[in-house]
Image: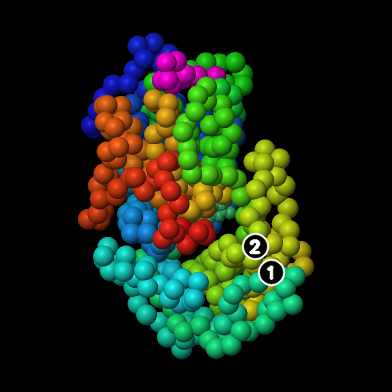
């Protein structure tokens, strides 16, 4: 085990680092810091790891992003999920989340510019893919109607559901992809791995203040009045991350906006005759702005790729309601344009939760303007897959900054473990301008 520079406060009760949030990313950060020899405390307001927005995640593992670094990080993460016991450094497979490797099929559409840029990244990173014709698509997904419906429309639009002429021209199949069967268990696996390295977790405990002296973080105060000191505090508060920043006795210096945006995912069981199963394909279809994930019992989960016609709805993470609305119904009807036999219920079931979305849909993995206060936030509905990588990145970033390096002017270059690529972490800066190559959607 390598040992990080000691960040001890000298107080016997002091921690090297306090992590606010024990979702999949917070637990991955705790695991990596504890593994490096740091004494960590994770604090979460909920009863167990992964109970926050992680529990609602579709947990799709895909490797296509609009930026090269985004694709590289996702391909790195794919390897972590594929070899999950090794990632956790355990021989015991009991109770581990499972990675179901279905491959992912992405339709070539106007919205994604027929994947031209994405394939350039795939070539550069040696991510395998195949071009599929319409015939191959329908062979693999019987009953799939390939008429064009682009651009996606809201249900109020008279043209909703009307074909717009021609057909989707084909798709790209990425064999290295799939989904994790239980995102909450994945977070718990990371938390258990952290505990094996000596990490401490406090649940049902809300942080109400982050203390600062001379522009250096000193620790946290919890709702029960307990005080915990540390020279490093990391905000991994998911949709609450803005509220967590507001607890800081100082300004984190974040330039790019991030906010909690409502998301709904609808679950439908298609007719058995269509042959959908847990091992079926994951599909991204930007012609109808839907992504579709197979699930257990032949269920399909249908989510949105955030087309311009759908408003972004910002909600308070403490009070938002979890009932599905007409949004979910719209996604189901959009997908029924592809599968007319789907059978959409007027009372859809599924999940409603929040993304902590930045304006360019890329995360913020960064230091802040207050020394010792770090950010793993703005995960924009697309960072479950990157959680193990984000854990390693945050560890290196903290070591880099705490050893006196000027990350804002000379950003950490983060070498990936599984693939031959070095990430310029300026990509994830809190001070960045909008990333123009972004899809400006959950696709990142
Ligand atoms: C509907 C949905 C679908 C998604 N699908 C995908 C997908 O298919 N693929 C993908 O890669 N990503 C996906 N994502 C995104 C991914 O799930 C998230 O990026 C990831 O789970 C965020 O993890 P986290 O640990 O940062 O946050 P969370 O899991 O939200 O954890 C944050 C934790 O912080 C705690 N907390 C907050 N404030 C405080 C406080 N003051 N004191 C103490 N504790 C506090 C909360 O209780 C919570 O447990 C999806 C997200 C959603 C909502």
Label 2, on which residue?
310
Residues packed near mark 2 inside 10 Å, few (<14), some (14 to 19) or many (20 plus): some
Q: Nearer the viewer, residue 401 or 229?
A: 401
Label 1, on which residue?
154
Q: Within the magenta stretch, is there residue 220?
A: yes
Bounds of the magenta segment: 211-221
Residues packed near mark 1 inside 10 Å, few (<14), some (14 to 19) or many (20 plus): some
Q: Position of residue 262 (x, y in %)?
A: 64, 51
User: Is mark 1 in CB contact (under 8 Å) with mark 2?
Assistant: yes
Real-space Cα distance between discs 1 and 2?
7 Å
Q: How is the image coloured?
A: rainbow
Q: Position of residue 407 (x, y in %)?
A: 31, 35
For residue 56, side relative to residue 107 (left or right): right
| Quadrant of the image occupied by residue 208 | top right
Q: Nearer the viewer, residue 307 or 92?
A: 307
Q: Position of residue 348 (x, y in %)?
A: 72, 63
């Amino acid at each position: 085990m390598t040992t990080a520079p000691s960040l001890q406060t000298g107080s016997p009760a002091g921690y090297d680092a306090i992590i606010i949030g024990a979702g999949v990313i917070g637990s991955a950060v705790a695991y990596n810091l504890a593994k490096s020899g740091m004494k960590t405390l994770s604090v979460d307001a909920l009863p167990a790891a992964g109970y926050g927005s992680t529990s609602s995640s579709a947990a799709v593992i895909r490797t296509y992003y609009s930026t090269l670094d985004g694709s590289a990080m996702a391909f790195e993460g794919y390897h972590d999920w594929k070899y999950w016991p090794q990632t956790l450094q355990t021989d015991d497979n009991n109770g581990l989340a499972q990675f179901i490797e279905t491959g992912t099929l992405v339709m070539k559409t106007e919205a994604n510019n027929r994947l031209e840029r994405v394939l350039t990244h795939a070539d550069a990173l040696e991510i395998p893919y195949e071009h599929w014709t319409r015939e191959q698509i329908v062979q693999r997904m019987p009953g799939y109607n390939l008429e064009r419906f682009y651009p996606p429309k809201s249900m109020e639009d008279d043209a909703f559901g009307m074909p717009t002429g021609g057909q989707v021209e084909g798709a790209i199949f990425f064999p290295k992809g799939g989904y994790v069967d239980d995102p909450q268990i994945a977070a718990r696996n990371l938390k258990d791995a952290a505990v094996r390295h000596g990490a401490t977790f406090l649940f049902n405990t809300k942080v109400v203040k982050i203390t600062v002296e001379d522009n250096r973080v000193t620790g946290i105060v919890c709702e029960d009045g307990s005080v915990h000191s540390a020279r490093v505090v990391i905000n991994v508060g998911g949709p609450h991350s803005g509220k967590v920043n507001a607890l800081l006795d100082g300004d984190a210096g974040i330039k790019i906006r991030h906010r909690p945006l409502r998301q709904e995912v609808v679950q439908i069981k298609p007719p058995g005759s269509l042959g959908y199963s847990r091992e079926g394909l994951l599909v991204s279809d930007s012609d109808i702005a839907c992504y579709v994930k197979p699930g257990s019992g032949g269920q399909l989960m249908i989510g949105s790729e955030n087309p311009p016609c759908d408003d972004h709805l910002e909600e308070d993470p403490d009070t938002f309601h979890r009932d599905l609305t007409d949004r979910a119904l719209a996604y189901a009807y959009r997908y029924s344009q592809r599968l007319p036999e789907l059978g959409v219920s007027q009372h859809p079931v599924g999940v409603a939760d929040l993304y902590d979305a930045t304006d360019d849909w890329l995360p913020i993995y960064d230091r802040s303007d207050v020394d010792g206060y770090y950010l793993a936030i703005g995960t924009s509905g697309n960072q479950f897959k990157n959680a193990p990588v984000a854990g390693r990145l945050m560890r290196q970033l903290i070591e880099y900054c705490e050893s006196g390096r000027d990350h804002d002017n000379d950003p950490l270059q983060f070498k990936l473990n599984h693939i031959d690529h070095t990430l310029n972490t300026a990509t994830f800066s809190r001070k960045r301008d909008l990333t123009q190559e972004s899809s400006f959607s959950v696709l990142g």
